[in-house]
């Protein structure tokens, strides 16, 4: 989960909601140069964080505060493997992009555990096999995954409240066309991206979140119960072409 401090406690955004926001952003991309297999790619984006199950996990820091996902360095290979297995039921293209995402997340840790290295080797083998079976060029796969990363990164910028003030620009990342994109929040709170990558000149995306006022918890189950009972709010962002 994504945890943002507030004046009265914590704002909590579930990881699956963040992934859905990434898919909303992907759906706004200009159609004339959208990535291959756009709708299947949207499915991969919306489900790429399905391994996050906040209701089953250790949700607390050592002092009992809600734990932001960035503070949890644990590598759970079994959960990663299950994510890949479940993605396969949606089709090889979705499984291929999810596999590439797992490689991206875990390759920096290669060499730390034999079972991790084996898992990473299996991902590379699967990616090669599915690319061949789907009869698609590797460059098109790479572009689709770059698109997925771009949407994921932009969603995180919004969810983690990383937008700078004073109308300063922030780099998102390189898009599927190998071009750099930046985002800026205007003085009227509207957002713009340069160069403009979207189909429409104005659109709004949203996500559900909740606020809790309790600062510390005795157990993850206590936090989970509080989250289940917390009121839900809608966070919205409107993008406009400058």
Image (tube, rainbow, N blue to C red):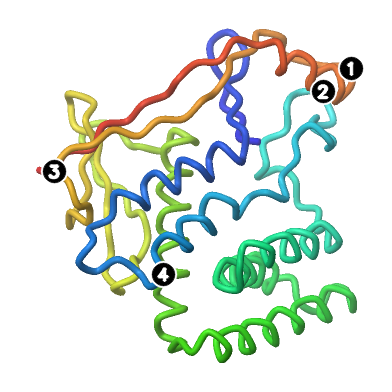
| Residues marked 1 and 3 touching at CB (< 8 Å) | no
Please give left or right for residue 44 compared with residue 63 in the image. left
Looking at the rendered image, the quarter that the N terminus falls into is top right
| Distance CA(mark 2)–CA(mark 4) | 44 Å
Q: Which residue is drawn at 51% across and 25% down?
A: 208
Query: In the rendered view, would you say 25 is above or below 61?
Result: below
Please give left or right for residue 225 compared with residue 91 in the image. right
Looking at the rendered image, the quarter that the C terminus falls into is top left
Disc 3 packing (10 Å; few <14; some 14–19; many ≥20): few
Between disc 2 and disc 4, whose residue precedes?
4
Q: Which label sits in the foreground, 4 or 3?
A: 4
Disc number for residue 218: 1
Identify the residue position indicated by label 4 in the image: 37
| Residues marked 2 and 1 touching at CB (< 8 Å) | yes
| Distance CA(mark 4)–CA(mark 1) | 46 Å
Q: Is mark 2 on a helix, strand or loop?
A: loop
């Amino acid at each position: 989960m994504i945890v943002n401090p507030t004046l009265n406690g914590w704002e909590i955004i579930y990881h699956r909601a963040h992934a859905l926001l990434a898919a909303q952003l992907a759906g706004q991309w200009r159609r004339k140069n959208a990535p291959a297999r756009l709708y299947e790619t949207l499915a991969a984006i919306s489900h790429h964080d399905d391994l996050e199950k906040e209701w089953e996990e250790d949700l607390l820091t050592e002092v009992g505060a809600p734990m932001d996902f960035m503070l949890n360095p644990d590598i759970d290979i079994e959960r990663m493997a299950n994510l890949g297995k479940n993605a396969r039921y949606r089709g090889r293209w979705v499984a291929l992009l999810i596999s590439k995402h797992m490689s991206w997340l875990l390759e920096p840790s290669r060499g730390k555990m034999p079972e991790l290295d084996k898992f990473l080797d299996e991902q590379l083998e699967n990616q090669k096999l599915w690319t061949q079976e789907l009869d698609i060029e590797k460059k098109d796969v790479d572009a689709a995954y770059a698109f997925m990363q771009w949407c994921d990164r932009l969603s995180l910028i919004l969810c983690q409240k990383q937008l700078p003030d004073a109308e300063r620009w922030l780099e998102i990342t390189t898009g599927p066309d190998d071009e750099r994109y930046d985002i800026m929040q205007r003085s009227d709170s509207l957002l713009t991206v340069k160069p403009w990558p979207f189909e429409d000149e104005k659109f709004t995306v949203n996500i559900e979140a909740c606020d809790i006022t309790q600062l510390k918890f005795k157990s993850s189950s206590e936090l989970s119960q509080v989250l289940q009972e917390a009121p839900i709010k809608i966070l919205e962002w409107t993008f406009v072409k400058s």
